[in-house]
Image (cartoon, rainbow, N blue to C red):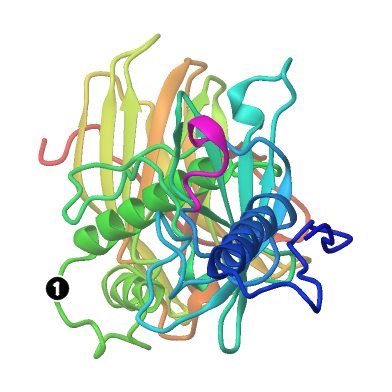
Amino acid sequence: MANETVNYGYPKPEEDDFYDINQFNQAMDMIDGDLKKTEEMKQNKLDIGAFTGNIDVLGEGGLPQTSSVSWCRSELVSGTLPVLSDAAYCFSLETCVAAENERDSARVQRVVLHETANIRILERMYVDGQWHEWKELLQKDGDLKDATVTFDSGDNESPAEWAEVAPVEGGEKQDSLWQKVSLFARNLRYLWKLCGTNDISGLADGTLTGAVSKLNTDIVPGYISCSYSFCEQHGWYRIAKSEGAYSSNSCLISAKRFYNNMPPEYQRIQFFGVYTLRKFINISAASLMHAWTKIRETWDETNNVSYLEIYQNADSANMWLISIEDALSPEGNIQSWKTIPPVLTQETINGVTVLALSELPANNPA
């Protein structure tokens, strides 16, 4: 028998040849061997169809020897699959092989995974003689809901102090950004801890600012004011003011002078302002050198402003602390007395009327 097939050289008996079982078996073995080679070539070279080998072992020594693309089904593939799933899925496996002069890290595999209603992309690298774990890549139009970010958290369920947080900047990596977010959460917990657990819903509008405003309004809504200044010349000084004239705005005046060029002094005066009834009553006084000798109320008719003024009878550099208490007026806040930094004025001014005047003792009780 001299005839053979053109492409693979299988034995081809003539019509007058006797049947030879050995020749038939030889042809079957040749066909089986060539089919096996074709299958291996499809898987390791062309890589099309269902991949049934181990995707960790592609080529000699466990490394892919050529770059390739395979179409795989999870239920047929052995080795380390891109993801574990009870349901079968398909994926295209792209293997990129490093050139001889490149490092092992250039050997990578990328998977485009096709699930029922989703497409995912995963990648892994071959480093130090082994394949590392698959890492899922984020697509430009992808969703971060299943992404995992590794970072050093600064959060604490019960923080004892405030944590400093660096400014958030553009171009930061995810781990740095989320570390700052964890510190934000920690500081929020700390603020919440400082707020306490008392119910403030019944105070104003129930907010912190509303509650604080309500408390301030209930306790000291302009009830007291103070000024601290340096004065050194003799004369009348304006120390407090209110809008209008002849208002119902009684108050308690406290004047303290700190020693510098002359010894200190203290005056405490009750002022009564009840419409046209305006007067001062000295409650107590103490001085080693008597300098504050008079106090008065004046009205600037041009500007419709009333002033409380105190007189210093000598040139002396001293620090003054003036306090006005119980200063509220039932007519409204603008009629209430408020301290101002002492302003030197004149004995008499056109358009300014003295509404009340009183002498101040050096010591009371004497």
Q: Is residue 134 above or below residue 23?
A: above
Image mark count: 1
Q: Nearer the viewer, residue 123 or 58?
A: 58
| Residue 281 shows in this picture | no
The residue pinned by badge 1 equals 197
Quarter of the view holding residue 114: bottom right
Query: Residue at left 28%, top 28%?
Result: 265
Is 267 displayed left or right of 170 in the figure? left
Is 59 contained in the magenta span? Answer: yes
Is 109 contained in the magenta span? Answer: no
Quarter of the view holding residue 163: top left
Badge 1: residue crowd in 10 Å (few <14, some 14–19, many ≥20): few
Instruction: Please state, as top left, top right, bottom left or bottom right, where the N terminus lies in the image.
Output: bottom right
| Residue 326 shows in this picture | yes
Horizontal and vertical percent position of residue 122: 58, 57
Amino acid type at mark 1: Thr
Is 266 displayed left or right of 151 in the figure? left
Q: Nearer the viewer, residue 110 or 233?
A: 110
Quarter of the view holding residue 26: bottom right
Horizontal and vertical percent position of residue 323: 35, 48
Instruction: Please state, as top left, top right, bottom left or bottom right, where the C terminus lies in the image.
Output: top left
View extreme (top): residue: 261
Horizontal and vertical percent position of residue 288: 22, 19
Query: Residue at left 42%, top 78%?
Result: 329
Is 340 displayed left or right of 140 in the figure? left
Magenta-drawn stretch, dominant element (helix, strand or loop): loop
For mark 1, give the secondary structure: loop
Horizontal and vertical percent position of residue 127: 50, 28
Q: Nearer the viewer, residue 256 or 116?
A: 116
Residue bounds of the magenta highlight: 55-62
